[in-house]
Image (cartoon, rainbow, N blue to C red):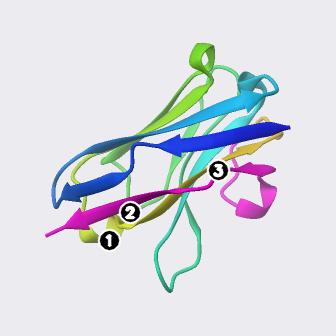
Amino acid sequence: QVQLVESGGGLVQDGGSLRLSCTASGRAFSDYAMGWFRQAPGNERGVVAGISWRSGGWTYYGDSVKGRFTISRDNAKSTMYLQMSSLKSEDMAVYYCAATRRYSISTHGADYDYWGQGTQVTVSS
């Protein structure tokens, strides 16, 4: 079992930055590939970014966040991060972190075994 807790969400102005954190407890964090997903009202949940297990040498970004968001992991702290810059109103959503026993990145939510409770990101214009 893995428990995931997101933090770092909040209110930010258009063009601003935020860093989300996802802290895991339970089984060895490094054994899981990880992902960030988001869901805005009326929309389906979609992948934002993913990072492979162990050293996190492979990363994936959705087209809408490429060049603005950076995913990373610190296995010693059992924590994954999402650095978000140049935020836009379209980025406003509840952000969820997720863990999968697969070693590779998946863009499909159904492939993930554990989920956090979500953290709200609000972008004001």
Q: How far apart are marks 1 and 3 (CA)?
A: 22 Å
- Name the kind of residue labelled 3 in the image: Gly
| Membership of 61 in magenta stretch | no
Residue furthest out toward the bottom: 42
Residue 7 position within the rendered picture, expressed as x and y whole percent measured from the top left:
47, 42
**Residue 31 at x, y = what percent?**
78, 26
Q: Given contact means CB atoms under 8 Å apart, are the residues at marks 2 and 3 in contact?
A: no
Nearer the N terminus, badge 2 or badge 3? 2
Residue at the image point whose x is 83% and y is 39% from the top: 101
For the residue carrying disc 1, how many other residues have a C-alpha within 10 Å: few (<14), some (14-19), or many (20+)?
few
Residue at mark 1 = 90
Please report the residue visible at 21 percent of the width from the left and 52 percent of the height from the top: 86
State if disc 2 and disc 1 touch (CB < 8 Å). Answer: yes
Q: Mark 2 points at which residue?
A: 64
Q: Quadrant of residue 50?
A: top right
Q: Give the range drawn in magenta.
A: 104-125
The image quadrant where one finds the N terminus is top right
Depicted 72 relative to depicted 65: above or below = above
C-alpha span from label 1 to label 2: 9 Å
Q: Tell me how many marks there are.
A: 3
